[in-house]
Amino acid sequence: MGSVSERAVVVGAGQLRRKPGLDFAEAAFEPQEPVTLVAEALRRAAADAGRPSLIEEADAIGWVPAVSWGYEDAPASLARALGRAAPRTGWACAPGGDGGVQVLNDAANRIAEGEVKIALVGGCEVLYSRRRARSEGVDLERCWTPGGSQLRFLGGEAMRFSNALERRHGVVNPISAYPFLENALRAAAGRSIDEHQAFLGRLYERFAEVASRNPYSWFPGPRSAADIATVTAKNRWVGFPYPKHMNAIMEVDQGAALVVMAASEADRLGIPPAQRATFLGGGRSVDGWSVSERAFLARSPAYAAAARETQRHAGLGPADVDLFDFYSCFPCVVEFALDALGLAPDDPRGLTQTGGLAQHGGPGNAYSLHGLANAALALRRRPNAVAWVSALGMTATKHAVCALSNDPRRVAASDGRATAVELPRAEKNGPPLVDHPTGKASVESYTVLYDRANEPTQSIFLLRLADGRRSLALGPTTPAAIERVTKREGVGISGTVTPGEGEKPNQFRFDA
């Protein structure tokens, strides 16, 4: 591996949860805006590093954007919340759940290039505060940084969540999009619906066990595989095949932060090697942007590419890793990572350091900062170990991966860099889309959306037309039709699609 002039090391980690009834009395709740919460997480990270003065000494601030509130200049706003001057270098990563890993990858590259010596990086989500404030009639524009509720999270067409065809058919958010990937994975694995639901319950039971021991988990109670997979009044269907306990929970007040610096600065400041987690390398890549535009539904070429790039920079393979934290907004993304790395779902090393987004809580774009914080802390308890943390954004679209270690041999074998990989078109983009199709079609994947009373409201089908192109259509919601696709396999069903007039949705009817 080629050498770099500087190595990035994580020397401090701080986390925060603000949940009434767990962290303070219900009556004591007050909404707290993102920069205030992250400022506290950063103070905890600096204290964890053994040097609170790092808050003032840092020459850079990296920010992971929050969904709940925006800032025109987030690093400067965070600096004010910390009571210090604006940093010489400040940046924010692009919106998306890959942000936590990506902000560390960015910091490592800036340190390696000599641009930055000490970076404070952080992010959070306060959607719980937003909901509470709205329900209690609190005008946050009067007590938080003005204008934050009006700043657009996705940043225009370049960062859209779904395309026009998908939106026309109700595929507008994660709970309506990710089920298409899971149903395709089940069909590719050849499992029955009952077998696959039991498989998913066992998979997430491993996450729940970790979450139950994590002092920052939003839902710290235990959950068994049956609790996770069995549909009940408290675990209703959301978007088939996912009941509530398999969905990321974004309505939380949680934050995490890291202090990252050049190894030479850690030497100068006397921060001991046992306190450090050295950045070995990272990678990122992007799949076809939305579900219907993607080349493959049952695997992620972009995760595989980002993982290979991380392994190249870090000089290691999956067998060399001791600790994993896989992004887990929905089970399918864990399955993508396992497939790309050739790992079994019951790998004895475990799959998470936090407990996952469904139970630890999924603080928007910043979740993987919790994974990184816990990985850095775990390395202190595991001499000469390697940690692997991965994250993703949009509909498992943007992937970011990194590896950390406290093993001098691993550090020597790595180059400490993070780079992006562009996929070939055939690995990224799927068949052309047809807005208003007609004729015979077969189901490539699908979902059924439910209301809070556990009643189906829509069935949505991703179709392959006779000429190989794709389209979307709504299907019937009769009891017989819903039973057909939720009790027996829906992938591969043949039928007829008719075009919707104007902006009305297309319609799909099963063959007899």
Image (tube, rainbow, N blue to C red):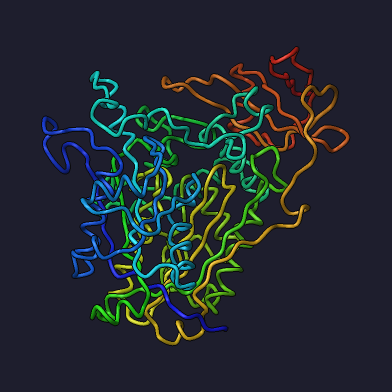
Question: From what the image shows, is residue 332 above or below residue 115?
Answer: above
Instruction: Name which quarter of the figure residue 271 lies in.
Output: bottom left
Residue 143 x %, y %: 23, 29
Which residue sits at x=49%, y=48%? 200
Place of residue 277 in the rendered image (x, y in percent of width and height, measured from the top left): 36, 73
Task: Determine which quarter of the picture holds residue 114.
Answer: bottom left
Considering depth in this image, is 488 or 27 the residue closer to the camera? 27
Report the residue at 77% width, 52% height from top: 425
Q: Nearer the viewer, residue 494 or 277?
A: 277
350 lies above or below 6: above
Q: Is residue 388 left or right of residue 30?
A: right
Residue drawn at x 43%, y 77% is 7
**Left or right: where does residue 387 sit relative to residue 495?**
left
Q: Nearer the viewer, residue 275 or 450?
A: 275
Q: Is residue 221 among the parts visible in the rendering?
A: no
Closer to the camera, 322 or 417?
417
The image shows residue 501, relative to residue 24, as above or below, that is: above
Q: How far from the left and from the top, in percent, is residue 173? A: 53, 32
